[in-house]
Image (cartoon, rainbow, N blue to C red):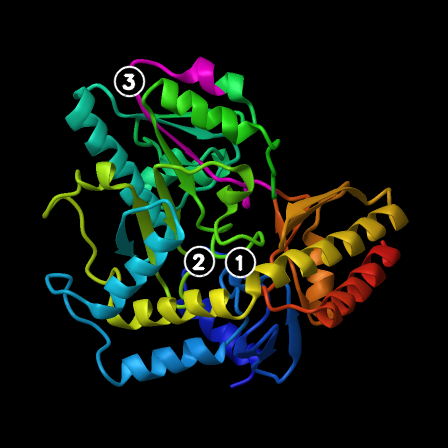
């Protein structure tokens, strides 16, 4: 079927939870997608920071094919070798001692909320359960993570929300100090706000956050669902700030496109998750963990982190040059590595649509921020192609 036929069928059978663009991808390779009509697209969205190794990375697809032929799923009542191997890899790469596996970033954040509350309940009593999060944050679509999210547009229509969450301005250490009360148990933050518009905090902010948490015996949770797994040029974004959390969540890019989430924690906290307190039927199954092992190893072995840092600087420079050429349209360029936002003086929706018509996939966050999260394997050739297209669009505006 062609794209029009697929879209017609989607309109009939798929719930309209997304404002979908008229694109039907059927094939991907590297930094490119092809639609059902054979048109090629340069992908600077990467499944919203999921396809960090590009589409259909050979090591990931080989791992999936091999595992699919051996064992796709079994219960978490049993020990799963690829799950154990992935847990070991992630713990050795991070501050953590233990991992819990699930299927998405929302589930990973849900697990983090539950662990923080259970640990605090056991250590400090029943009244210590409040979690402080940031305005403009995004932590997921479950009821708990919607309640944790600091965006009214995400929470709208779903009252009553879960109580026990307080939202404060991001990048404001004093606001955090002022918000802490006797019932506070944890602070949950994104090292860089993605859905919030690619907001990068001051260099000293997280140093202060860590200090405040230590002074008040609070658990520090980092939501690295979007910014982890090399997106910023380091395996985990919090490494840029010289501190470690007590709990970290990962998902999106962890398995090269296969659906997986994980919550990593220190031994001290992990002990609160005893048999029966939490679980996931599909979490960490053989198929997705095999893909994730291949993904993590590829990031380590193929120089992805150094490349991300280098090409990120190049992309940032090219975008800043566009800002100088079109100062009435571009007000700021910000980001780290290949997590870059371009603040516009106008809504960005028409730019995204114009790019799509020209075979370029972009995304807009918070209405006026173009978000650039291409595959980490992107090269100067693809950056130059994207910049040329974007320049044409801005020139027309």
Number of other residues with Cα within 10 Å of mark 1, as a class: few under 14, some 14 to 19, many 20 or more:
many
Instruction: Identify the residue shown where x is 29% and y is 73%.
Output: 287
- The residue pinned by badge 2 equals 252
Near-viewer residue (313 or 157): 313
Instruction: Identify the residue shown where x is 58% and y is 71%.
Output: 23
C-alpha span from label 1 to label 2: 8 Å
Report if residue 168 is visible in the image: no
- The residue pinned by badge 1 equals 48
Near-viewer residue (379 or 27): 379
Q: Please provide percent x and percent y for residue 35.
A: 58, 79
C-alpha span from label 3 to label 1: 35 Å
Of mark 1 and mark 2, the one earlier in the sequence is 1
Q: Is residue 181 magenta?
A: yes
Report if residue 111 is visible in the image: yes
Q: Please provide percent x and percent y for residue 237.
A: 51, 46
Of mark 3 and mark 1, the one earlier in the sequence is 1
Q: Do the residues labelled 2 and 3 touch (CB within 8 Å)?
A: no
* Front position among marks 3 and 1: 3
Instruction: Identify the residue shown where x is 45% and y is 55%.
Output: 17
Number of other residues with Cα within 10 Å of mark 3, as a class: few under 14, some 14 to 19, many 20 or more:
some
Q: In this view, does 124 lie above or below 286?
A: above
Residue 156, image quadrant: top left
* Front position among marks 1 and 2: 2
For the record, the magenta segment spans: 176-197
- The residue pinned by badge 3 equals 183
Of mark 2 and mark 3, the one earlier in the sequence is 3
């Amino acid at each position: 079927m062609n794209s029009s036929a697929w879209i017609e069928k989607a309109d009939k059978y798929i719930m309209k939870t997304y404002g979908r663009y008229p694109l039907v991808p059927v094939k991907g390779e590297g930094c490119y997608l092809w639609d059902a009509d054979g048109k090629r697209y340069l992908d600077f969205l990467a499944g919203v920071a999921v396809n960090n190794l590009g589409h259909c990375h050979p090591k990931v697809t080989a791992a999936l094919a091999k595992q699919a032929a051996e064992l796709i799923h079994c219960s978490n009542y049993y020990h799963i070798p690829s799950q154990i191997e992935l847990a070991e890899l992630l713990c050795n790469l991070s501050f953590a001692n233990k991992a819990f596996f699930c299927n998405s970033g929302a589930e990973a954040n849900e697990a983090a909320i539950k662990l923080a509350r259970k640990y605090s309940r056991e250590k400090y009593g029943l009244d210590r359960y409040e979690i402080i999060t940031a305005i403009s944050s995004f932590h997921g679509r479950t009821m708990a993570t919607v309640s944790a999210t600091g965006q009214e547009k995400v929470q709208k229509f779903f009252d009553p929300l879960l109580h026990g969450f307080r939202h404060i301005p991001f990048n404001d250490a004093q606001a955090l100090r002022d918000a802490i009360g006797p019932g506070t148990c944890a602070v949950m933050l994104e090292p860089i706000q993605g859905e919030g518009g690619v907001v990068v905090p001051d260099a000293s902010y997280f140093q202060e956050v860590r200090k405040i948490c230590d002074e008040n015996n609070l658990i520090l949770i980092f939501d690295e669902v979007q910014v982890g797994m090399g997106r910023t040029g380091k395996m985990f974004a919090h490494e840029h700030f010289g501190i470690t959390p007590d709990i970290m969540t990962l998902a999106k890019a962890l398995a090269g496109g296969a659906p997986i989430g994980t919550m990593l924690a220190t031994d001290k906290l992990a002990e609160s998750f005893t048999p029966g307190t939490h679980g996931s039927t599909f979490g960490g199954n053989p198929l997705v963990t095999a893909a994730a092992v291949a993904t993590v190893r590829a990031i380590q072995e193929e120089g992805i982190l150094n490349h991300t840092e280098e090409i990120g600087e190049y992309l940032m420079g090219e975008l800043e040059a566009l800002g100088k050429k079109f100062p009435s349209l571009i007000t700021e360029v910000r980001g780290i590595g290949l997590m870059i936002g371009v603040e516009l003086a106008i809504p960005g929706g028409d730019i995204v649509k114009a790019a799509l018509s020209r075979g370029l996939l972009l995304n807009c966050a918070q209405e006026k921020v173009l978000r650039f999260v291409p595959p980490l394997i992107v090269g100067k050739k693809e950056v130059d192609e994207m910049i040329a297209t974007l320049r044409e669009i801005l020139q027309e505006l």
